[in-house]
Image (tube, rainbow, N blue to C red):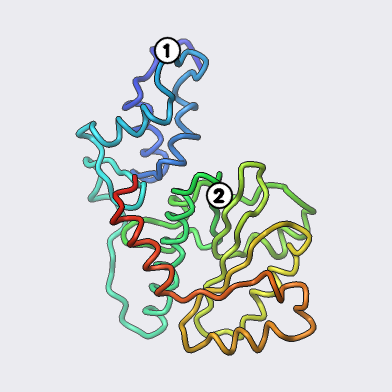
Amino acid sequence: MNDEKELTYSEAIEQVMLYNGYFAPLKLIYKEIWKYKDKSKISGKTPDMTIQERVQRDERFTRIGLGVYALKEYLDKLPKIISPKTETEKKERLHATIQGMLIEIGNNKKEVEDTYTNDKKWLFENKTLGSLATLSEIPNFTYENIIKETVRFADVIWFNKRGFPYKIFEVEESTDFRDAFVKFIELQDFQTQFYCISTEDRKEKFRKELRKSAFEALHNRCEFKTYENVQNDYENILRKNYL
């Protein structure tokens, strides 16, 4: 911090959003606000409660997702949604939608400290996935080659408070699940939970591939969830009026 006048909470939140692309999830604001405020000078209410109060009550902010807030003044600068024209574009849009929901769900769980995605430029509604996630890079929790060659390509990862991968999700539209299993195998020595997300009609394919001896380490550690499971979880949280 420098000797300039201390920013108010709302002013600091605004700076976080401006830097992040005009919006930010609460979990990111909690972390990044201290670039603009001196935490050592804070007293009274817990900072997170104060931040929640400001984003809900200050007229300059509006909610645009599950625990995601934007600057009203800059809503026109958010990415525009273009209707997909080809089957490939439709699949990519669905893929990005599921990833976006998983990131927002993770950002709203107390046991999740950070979220990550490799597909940073993809859009969920009018939000880039990279700006929804709280991490732009994978933390150095293990050997560099494992992170650089495998883990960083994951669709979505939730990290716990100790900086280790808590849950990892792969959205599988048409592949045979093997690429996902290879990523998971690299993390078999951690207490990470693994999930493949796809359509109900591919569940048997998932089970068949998982039974192969090459993936024995995953037999009791990898779960299958449908797109509908994720969408229902997301919508249920929204209905409960979570931040």
Q: Name the residue tied to disc 1.
A: 4
Pointer 1 and pointer 2: residues touching (CB < 8 Å)?
no
Label 1 vs label 2: CA separation? 29 Å
In the rendering, at what x and y percent does residue 231 appear?
A: 38, 68
Residue at 43% across, 68% down: 230
Residue at 35% across, 52% down: 66
Q: Name the residue tied to disc 2.
A: 136
Q: Amino acid at mark 2?
A: Ser
In the rendering, at what x and y percent does residue 50 appear?
A: 36, 27
Q: Taking 140 as reference, is 69 left or right?
A: left
Q: Nearer the viewer, residue 179 or 189?
A: 189
In the rendering, at what x and y percent does residue 58 appear?
A: 23, 31
Q: Earlier in the sequence, mark 1 or mark 2?
A: 1
For the residue carrying disc 1, how many other residues have a C-alpha within 10 Å: few (<14), some (14-19), or many (20+)?
Answer: few
In the depicted structure, whether residue 210 falls above or below residue 180: below
| Element class at badge 1 | loop
Q: Nearer the viewer, residue 25 or 161?
A: 161
